[in-house]
Image: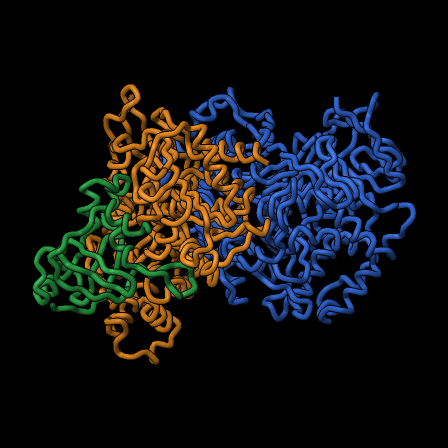
């Protein structure tokens, strides 16, 4: 038996309504328990105790990430760290090697991370990298937004087949849920074009983004998937896109779910909250977005906060990357993937002197500050798109301190005063709210029952920060907040102390979650289509397609209860 | 027994539709394969090295496997500047193990891209890589350009399966739906099936690529009447074909990476493709040679941050092609021991590098007698990945496919041998 | 003896690839210890069956073979130990030796190409 007790911490555990309580936490064999007999004692005397961090959207593995590393040796050279007796060499600032990704998250107190964009055809690649990332439990979302099977079934109204296909694909790719990037528009990009509204047609396929979103949202529910459909909106990154974002959010309005979670998640909403007609008239519409979120309980968003400095952008939205590259003139990679998806990568420099970048920076903070319910807005940077993951501590200090924001506002281009509303916002996040947006909300949205909280039976993933919440005022002591969140006093993963005083002290290998939503005869529904399309249009054989468990570290299958199956028969 | 959908462990096309007939533990026949794959698979049992060998004054003599692992561990531990080289014809799992070993002993590690598409890497590190998967080409491409490559010889099924003769969703007439352009310095079997053959002067690729870019961005008037042996009129015609294509692709080979300004050629090709995307859809793809050279680049990159030519002697990854590339560290006589896995550098490196290979302890993990085993001091025979060992390989378009094992071997795999060496070194430490 | 300046390129051929795993075979020798040249070049130099190719670093004897599509000032040697014996390290800082477009001279010879073992033997000592 392996027992540990964390004594005298000030605990914030929002999912169990524990807030600012001096409370001991007992751990046995990797789980939180109600008492222990012969534990190792960790007296943390008044320090801040959170559940282990959960990042619900961070590009850490797979073809796009590796292509970012490949084209950016200059980024790789930025954070070189030699091996130690227990750790492997690290490289990279915005595009880190797999070891560095695990270590850097763990040092900041994170224990679970979601890779949100897995191309099915290269799913093995995503899982090979996930397997090699130490310290973290991992999930990945499979890309469906402009897949030919999806668009075919949507156009023919074959919702049962669509459900069967999604279930098959999640199993075949060991994916956790449905990711939709630029629905329909990605297919048009394969001809160098895009879509402009939810009702634009996808070339040749005769479907619209609205239909794709609606049907996948239905299928998500039919299959009882743990996570909402996870949507990167159309026109992302373009001035004036807030309208289409609000339209997309409204698709979920009133859509009740069995699991009692929202049916739709809008990711990195900062990039989708733009006003103006072009980059000259560009302004913040975070208020419009927040208004919709505050009145629509059927959606969650994550921030996608932008921070000044250089980083690498990467997305399955190839059109977006091409256009970004046209503005910057930087190097650019594209990766259209047959029948399924696409993607692009290009570096970017966000400058505090450039009006557009300053407004983008403000939009993310505004969204976080204007959305009332912290369970509806997770903290992300869309690593590395808005900023590298190591910038989280700074963002937390900005959310907790108006004074810090005011100080920053003085340093940046004046556009922030004219075309954003950040300067007028007084709200300051509390510790409990920070625990929600970095842990509880994300665990809840992924329905990871053992994550994001410290109740009995939860995984013993705990972070202890070197800060005494009752002795400091985060709105004044923001530097201390930033410092504390940069390097955990302790990170405990599965009951083991893996970080102490901001240093990795033990290297562990996490679990990999995936969702099995099979139902009776689901394969028979789609077998002919799969065989036909693989034989004629794919370049990889159906038999050689997909991932098996040899690629997963400690695989954890989540079984769902699809409301379809034996009762479904082909007409 | 008939085994279907076998993956061919020869070239970067990584065809996964082979049918292999196995009887007992022997291969009786292989279908759906080109001559290259056929010879490798059917010939897998010929000329194998049967036991570990060590060289002394009289020549090579047999030793036990255990002794061979011991000797390998000793050579690597005693070296001050070891190099680990090869990797393109084994599985990603073995490559990962190789990098673990390199990190452990603080070695240089390089892979065959260093004498192949290394300049491609440097070119795309300048300009990026606008690309796609081979199925995109199959389904959409109406203009296919083969530049400095000869798939008929190096990738014999590429044109049939992916890029020229195949039918796809938007190209249901196959070859008739596509225009084929070949650019090369000499006629080849590939140029014979082209609609247009541009026979250019050796080393003029850079000029011609940039001339095409100039025409496409509207600066054609500054060009002379003839460039690299091609008239300006003809280049304008080619540029027109490119702009008017609905979906174009440039496949390029060693004719571009090894010639003239090398990496600059690739950078300028990438820039040309970028400009074309303002008008239409265009992609670029290197014709990777060995079946898993793309996997080697990928594994190197996610583990260390860099794709090849890595020096781990400082404890972190130091990457500087031209300095840390295998031929450079050998020709400078820095390297004092080498481990070769799944490659034959003595056949494919240049004279000054091989002279150094002849001077230093050389360990070869290798199934066959090769040019490298002629110089090796220690030879450890190995199972052939993709025939006698399974694992992951990456196609030239970066698509991972699991290669199969369909023959039992008495030899260990690259992965197992490297694991044994690591464990032996652990025992010494 | 007649001598001529040419550009040397090396590269893959299907025969070279077919026997790449069998480097000591006669087939591999035939496929790679060979120099492909334009017919007119062969005539001009009175080359019979064998040709000697010289570069800044070394010389090698190869079997001479006619090829139609190759320009008169170019020779092609399939990649492999024979071609690479006469190739030098590059100063281009890309880490890539020059395998194509190398300056060379060629001349007729009565010598025969070395077997692989003997060729590799030249690197020793
Ligand atoms: Zn993202």
Q: Position of residue A448 (x, y in %)?
A: 68, 32
Compared to C106, does A539 lie above or below? above
Q: Position of residue A554 (x, y in %)?
A: 59, 29
Q: Would residue A155 appear left or right of B242 to someone viewing this image?
A: right
Compared to B361, does A32 lie above or below? above
Residue B119 visible in this rendered orientation of the protein? no
Name the residue located 74 percent from the left edge and 29 percent from the top edge.
A458
The quadrant where residue A78 appears: bottom right
Chain B image colour: orange
Compared to A161, does B305 lie above or below? below
The quadrant where residue B292 appears: top left
Compared to B384, does B79 lie above or below? below
Chain C image colour: green
The residue closer to the viewer here, A210 or B249, is B249
Q: Would residue A569 appear left or right of A225 to someone viewing this image?
A: left
Chain A image colour: blue
Name the residue located 23 percent from the left edge and 60 percent from the top edge.
C59
Q: Position of residue C121 (x, y in %)?
A: 28, 48
Q: Position of residue B247 (x, y in %)?
A: 36, 56
């Amino acid at each position: 038996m392996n027992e540990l007790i964390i004594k005298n911490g000030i605990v914030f555990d929002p999912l169990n309504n524990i807030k600012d309580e001096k409370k001991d936490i007992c751990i046995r064999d990797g789980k939180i328990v109600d008492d222990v007999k012969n534990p190792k004692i960790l007296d943390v005397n008044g320090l801040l105790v959170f559940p282990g961090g959960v990042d619900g959207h961070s590009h850490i593995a797979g073809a796009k990430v590796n292509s970012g590393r490949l084209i950016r040796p200059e980024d790789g050279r930025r954070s070189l760290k030699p091996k130690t007796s227990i750790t492997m060499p690290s490289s990279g600032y915005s595009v880190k090697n797999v070891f560095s990704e695990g270590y850097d998250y763990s040092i900041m107190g994170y224990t679970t991370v979601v890779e949100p964009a897995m191309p099915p055809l290269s799913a093995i690649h995503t899982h090979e990298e996930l397997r090699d990332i130490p310290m973290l439990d991992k999930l990945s979302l499979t890309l469906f937004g402009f897949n030919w099977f999806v668009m075919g079934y949507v156009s023919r109204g074959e919702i049962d087949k669509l459900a069967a296909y999604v279930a098959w694909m999640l199993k075949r790719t060991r994916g956790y849920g449905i990711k939709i990037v630029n629905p329909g528009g990605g297919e048009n990009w394969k001809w160098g074009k895009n879509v402009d509204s939810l009702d634009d047609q996808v070339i040749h396929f005769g479907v619209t983004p609205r239909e794709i979103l609606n049907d996948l949202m239905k299928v998500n529910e039919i299959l009882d998937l743990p996570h909402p459909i996870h949507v990167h909106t159309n026109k992302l990154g373009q001035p004036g896109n807030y309208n289409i974002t609000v339209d997309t959010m409204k698709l979920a309005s009133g859509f009740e779910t069995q699991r009692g979670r929202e049916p739709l998640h809008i990711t990195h909403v900062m990039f989708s909250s733009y006003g103006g007609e072009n980059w000259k008239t560009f302004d913040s519409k975070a208020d419009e977005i927040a208004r919709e979120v505050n009145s629509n309980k059927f959606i969650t968003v994550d921030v996608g906060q932008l921070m000044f400095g250089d980083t690498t952008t990467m997305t399955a939205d190839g059109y977006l990357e091409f256009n970004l590259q046209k503005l910057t003139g930087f190097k650019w990679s594209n990766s259209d993937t047959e029948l399924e998806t696409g993607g692009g990568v290009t570096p970017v420099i966000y400058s505090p002197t450039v009006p557009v970048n300053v407004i983008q920076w403000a939009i993310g903070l505004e969204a976080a500050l204007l959305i009332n319910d912290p369970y509806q807005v997770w903290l992300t940077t869309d690593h590395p798109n808005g900023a590298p993951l190591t910038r989280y501590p700074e963002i937390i200090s900005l959310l907790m301190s108006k004074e810090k924001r005011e100080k920053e506002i003085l340093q940046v281009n004046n556009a922030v005063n004219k075309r954003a509303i950040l300067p007028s916002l007084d709200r300051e996040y509390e510790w409990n709210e920070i625990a929600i947006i970095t842990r509880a909300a994300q665990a809840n949205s992924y329905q990871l029952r053992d994550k994001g909280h410290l109740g009995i039976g939860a995984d013993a993933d705990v972070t202890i920060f070197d800060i005494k919440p009752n002795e400091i005022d985060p709105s004044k002591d923001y530097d201390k907040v930033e410092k504390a969140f940069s390097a955990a006093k302790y990170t405990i993963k599965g009951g083991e102390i893996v970080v102490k005083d901001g240093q990795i002290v033990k290297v562990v290998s996490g679990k990999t979650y995936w969702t099995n939503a099979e139902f009776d005869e689901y394969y028979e529904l789609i077998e002919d289509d799969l065989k036909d399309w693989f034989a004629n249009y794919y370049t990889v054989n159906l038999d050689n397609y997909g991932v098996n468990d040899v690629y997963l570290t400690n695989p954890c299958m989540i079984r769902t209860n699809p409301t379809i199956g034996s009762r479904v028969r082909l007409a | 027994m008939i085994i279907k959908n076998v993956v061919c462990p020869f070239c970067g096309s990584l065809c996964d539709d082979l049918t292999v007939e196995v009887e007992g533990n022997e291969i009786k026949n292989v279908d759906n394969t080109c001559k290259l794959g056929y010879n490798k698979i059917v010939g897998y049992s010929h000329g194998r090295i049967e036991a570990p060998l060590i060289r002394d004054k009289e020549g090579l003599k047999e030793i036990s496997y255990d002794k061979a692992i011991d000797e390998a561990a000793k050579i690597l531990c005693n070296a001050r500047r070891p190099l680990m080289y090869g990797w393109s014809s084994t599985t990603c799992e073995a490559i990962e193990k190789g990098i673990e070993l390199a990190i452990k002993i603080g070695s240089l590690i390089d892979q065959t891209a260093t004498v192949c598409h290394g300049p491609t890497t440097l070119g795309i590190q300048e300009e990026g890589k606008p690309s796609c998967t081979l199925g995109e080409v199959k389904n959409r491409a109406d203009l296919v350009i083969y530049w400095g490559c000869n798939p008929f010889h190096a990738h014999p099924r590429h044109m049939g399966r992916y890029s020229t003769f195949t039918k796809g969703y938007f190209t249901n007439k196959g070859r008739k739906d596509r225009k084929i352009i070949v650019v090369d310095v000499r006629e080849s079997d590939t140029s014979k099936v082209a609609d247009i053959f541009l026979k250019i002067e050796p080393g003029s690729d850079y000029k011609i690529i940039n001339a095409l870019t100039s025409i496409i961005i509207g600066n054609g008037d500054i060009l002379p009447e003839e460039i690299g042996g091609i008239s300006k009129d003809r280049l304008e015609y080619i540029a027109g074909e490119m702009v008017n294509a609905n979906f174009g692709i440039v496949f390029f080979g060693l004719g571009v990476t090894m010639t003239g300004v090398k990496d600059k050629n690739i950078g300028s090709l990438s820039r040309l493709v970028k400009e074309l995307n303002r008008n239409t859809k265009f992609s670029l793809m290197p014709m990777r040679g060995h079946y898993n050279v793309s996997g080697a680049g990928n594994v190197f990159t996610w583990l260390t941050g860099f794709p090849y030519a890595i020096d781990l002697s400082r404890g972190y990854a130091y990457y500087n092609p031209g300095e840390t590339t295998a031929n450079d560290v050998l020709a400078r006589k820095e390297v004092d021991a080498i481990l070769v896995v799944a490659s034959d550098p003595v056949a494919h490196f240049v004279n000054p590098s091989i002279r150094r290979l002849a001077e230093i302890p050389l360990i070869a993990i290798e199934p066959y007698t090769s040019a490298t085993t002629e110089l090796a001091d220690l030879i450890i025979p190995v199972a052939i990945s993709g025939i006698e060992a399974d694992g992951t390989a990456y196609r030239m378009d970066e698509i991972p496919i699991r290669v199969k094992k369909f023959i039992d071997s008495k030899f260990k795999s690259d992965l197992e041998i490297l694991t044994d060496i690591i464990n032996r070194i652990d025992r010494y430490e | 003896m007649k001598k001529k300046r040419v550009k040397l390129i090396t590269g893959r051929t299907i025969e070279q690839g077919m026997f790449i795993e069998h480097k000591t075979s006669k087939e591999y020798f035939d496929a790679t210890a060979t120099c492909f040249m334009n017919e007119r070049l062969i005539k001009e130099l009175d080359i019979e069956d064998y040709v000697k190719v010289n570069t800044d670093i070394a010389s090698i004897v190869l079997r001479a073979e006619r090829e139609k599509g190759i320009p008169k000032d170019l020779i092609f040697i399939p990649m492999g130990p024979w071609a690479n014996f006469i190739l030098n390290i590059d100063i281009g800082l890309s880490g890539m030796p020059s395998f194509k477009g190398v300056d060379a001279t060629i001349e007729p010879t009565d010598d025969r190409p070395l077997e692989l073992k003997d060729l590799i033997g030249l690197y020793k000592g």
